[in-house]
Every structure is written in C-alpha cells, then in structure tokens.
Image (spheres, helix red, strand yellow):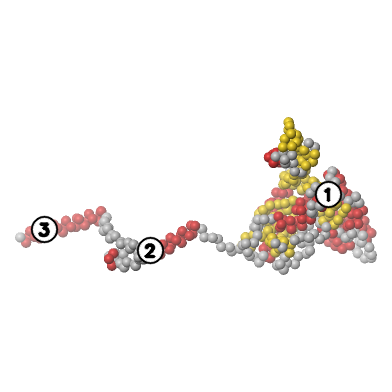
Amino acid sequence: MGTKNYITAIEIGSSKVAGTVGVATYEGINIIAYASEPVDGFISKGVVRNVDAASACLTDIINRLEAQLDNKVTIEKAYTTIGGISVRSVKSTVKREFDEYKKITPEIIDAMAIENDNEFVVPEGYQKVQVIVQDYKLDGSVNTAPTGFHTRSIEGSYLNIIINEQFMKQLGESFEMAKIEIVDSFTAAKLEADILLNKDDKHSCALVNMGAETTTISIYTNELLRKLVVLPLGGENITRDISTQHISREEAESIKMFKGYGAAGSDNSLIANETLNKIIAARIEEILLNIKHQIESSGEKVGHIFFTGGAAKLKNLKALLDEHLQEYNTRIITEPSLRCFNDSGLSLASDAITPTLFGLLSTGKENCCKEVGAKEPATPVQLSLLENVDEEENNEPETDTPAEEKKVEEKKPEEKVETKKPEKPRKKPKWQQTLINMFSDFTDNITEDEESDDE
C-alpha cells in the first residue's frame, strides 16, 4: 500500500462534481475509486456559488472514495480543474530593439517573459493562472525557436489565461472547508485538448466542449493554444426551451436525450416532433453562430472543429453542424481512447472517466493519500529513553562485599583482567565527626575520675 502513488482528481463541472482515485501503471491508469454528485444550484456555469454546499458535496465525494478504498487510506490532497464562465485568455506582447544585429540568447528570452509577467495588466477582479508563449517575430518574420538567431528586433507574443479572482477564492474555500488540500489546479480546456488532440489536429483546429451550461472554445494553430473563450450557453438552454411547452424540466431533459434533433414518427409524446425540432434547431444555431464568430475574430486559420462534451451527444447533431458550419470540417469526438482500466470491480459508465479527469490523473505526481494506522518510526529521543532503561536495569547496586570475595569473570587470553581498586573509606559528615569527638572526650573524663578514686 505504501509503495503506491495514489492520485486523487476532482472535476468541477456545470452538471456534476466528479472525483476519482487512480494509480499509474505500465498498462495505463488503474482506476480504483470513483464517485460523483449532481450539481443542484451551488455551482452555476462551472463556478462555485455556494461555498457551504460545495464543501458538503466535496466531503461526501471524499467519504465515498475512501469507502471504496476499504478505509485503508485517507485522502488528504487532490488535483482539480479550473474552468467555467470565469476563464478566458488575453494576448500580450513584449518587444526588444537593438542598435545592431544581436544574437538571441536564452537570457533575452527569459527577460522578456519576466517583463510580460511584470508589465501585463490583469483586468480588475481577475488573476493570472497561466501564461502560454506563442511565438516571436524576428525583424517581422515569425519564429517559434528564436534562440541563436541574429536580429535587430524581436517581439514575443504571450497568451495569458485569467480567471475571476472571487470565483477562484470560492473554489479554494470549498476545498479548505472540506479539509482537502489542492496540490495543483489546471485549466480544464487545455487538459482536455492535450488528451483528445494530437499534433496534427492542433495544427489548425478548434476544440469545442458543449457542456450543460457553458460552451468552451479552444483554438489551436501550429500546435499552440491561441485563444480560449467560454460562452454562457449549453445543453441546459435546450432543456429550458423545451420546458416552456408546459413540460417539467425532468421530462424535457428526457425528451431531449431520447429524441434529439430530427425526431420523426408518432407524436404521442408531450411535445410534437415538429415543435421539438424547431426548438433544438434554433438553440443549436445560436450556439454554432457564436462559435463561428469567435473563430473568425481570432484571426487564426482553422480548418477543423472537434466537438465534445455532454451536449455534443445530442442525436443528429452532425446534421446541424453540416448546415451551419459548411466551411469547416466538423467531427464529434464521442469515444476517446483513454489508457485507463480498473481491476477493483468498479461499475463505471462508459463516460465516467472524462478526458479532463484522465488528464488530471496523468499529470498528477504527488501522492494524495495517507495509509491509515501506519506506524511512526521511533524518534532518537525515544531510542535514548529505551537505552537508559536498559542501562538502569543492568546496573546492580553497590554492596560492602570485600573485593577479594567477588568472583572475577573469566576473560579471553588476549584481554586483560582489570582488578577492582579497594574503595576508600567514606568520610563522615563534619557534624557527625564533632559529635563523636565530644562523646569520646566525655567517656575519657569519666574513666580518669574512676581511676583517681581507686587510688
């Protein structure tokens, strides 16, 4: 147990909070515990709104995970995600000009990065959580690895990932109240892209996660993240639109997932197929037009758009993608190949371990669990106390037995037998010696008197 490295990952989503514990092996990630809780208002659009409720949710998830570990370990730490409507990206540049051609060194590159950290003005109410170096312009020519080149000017481009400061504080407070230390937090969109996309995909694409309440757009060119934006629109908007037809939210959600877009056949349900198709088409069109606008405004050349997330599982969504995004190659990623398995008998849904959770498990390195009942090694102080006890038990009290009556143990020929020196008579205390002298003088006087009387 103690030799394993247990990684705890917790994903904060718009529809649920999910946690898992895994162990990295040569075969992949071994999932040994999983638990999730639906979000009931305390998280909105991927952001913690009610700290107390979020803390209670986290505590429940941790307790359920520990129960699956047979209570052999306690979870003390976790890796988590940051995302939702509070996250976005802002570009910045740093420029250097030289009087003559100068070779670019690592020191120049580092100094430019430090200047960006110091000079970039974070919007009020936000904090910077990550900086992604884009590329450099050497005398106007783009270069991604400028070290060693000679130039008279260099301009570095940076993508700063920022998050709402108050929302970040509320997330941290929720974990603190649940007594779980956050080892590290990662941008959910970037984790997901690193798992789902390869280098060829990132050459020119957009990854779109259509969630319950948000749609996250990550734009990549030349293998670099160029833009990150989150729209406050998702699958929940479709459910609300359907429920306007005097249908409960639960029934609306069921109809959306069961029928989807392009429903045909009998109209024995609570809503006519034609009405349902119009509602779904209108909301999806709004989301897709917003995605298209974000891609075009980025100034990046994008050829492919990959869709993932819960709302991307809507039936016949591809027909709407082909209709509204004709200039792009679109694909829905439904079955990502994740190198994870479980040998502990867990019954997991096919999509339980999301790419984001898998990304946290793969990235995490620090052990998050502590073995219950592990014995603490004895401290030097404890050892010295034990040694003193042994010495006291082995030391015999001194007696007045003459030295010559004591048996001398036999020694090996090469060892010398040490003869114990006779002890010096102990001196009596001064007051005792004085009293003895006085008594001696008194007895002597009596003796002299008796002798004189005899004469």
- Which residue is tagged 1? 204
Mark earlier in primary sequence (3, 2): 2
Mark 3 is on which residue type?
Glu
Mark earlier in primary sequence (2, 1): 1
Residue at point 70%, 64% (across, down) = 32
Q: Residue furthest left?
A: 455
The tag on residue 254 is none
Q: Residue furthest top?
A: 99
In what element is the residue under mark 2? loop
Circle 2 Cα neighbour tier, 10 Å, few/some/many (<14 / 14–19 / ≥20) = few
Residue 219 at what x, y percent from top left? 81, 48
Q: Is residue 226 left or right of residue 169?
A: right
Q: Is any atom of residue 34 visible in this view?
A: no
Is the N terminus in the top left, top right, bottom left or bottom right quadrant?
Answer: bottom right
- Which residue is tagged 2? 395
Residue at point 36%, 66% (across, down) = 412
- Which residue is tagged 3? 448
The span from disc 1 to disc 3 (Cα, nearest Å) is 131 Å
- Between 123 and 420, the one nearer to me in the picture: 420
Residue 121 at what x, y percent from top left? 74, 39
In what element is the residue under mark 3? helix
Circle 3 Cα neighbour tier, 10 Å, few/some/many (<14 / 14–19 / ≥20) = few
- Between 280 and 363, the one nearer to me in the picture: 363
Q: Is residue 245 left or right of residue 70?
A: right
Residue at point 25%, 53% (across, down) = 430
Q: How many marks?
A: 3
Task: Residue 275: name its quadrant.
Answer: bottom right
- Between 384 and 372, the one nearer to me in the picture: 384
The span from disc 2 to disc 1 (Cα, nearest Å) is 84 Å
Residue at point 78%, 53% (across, down) = 193
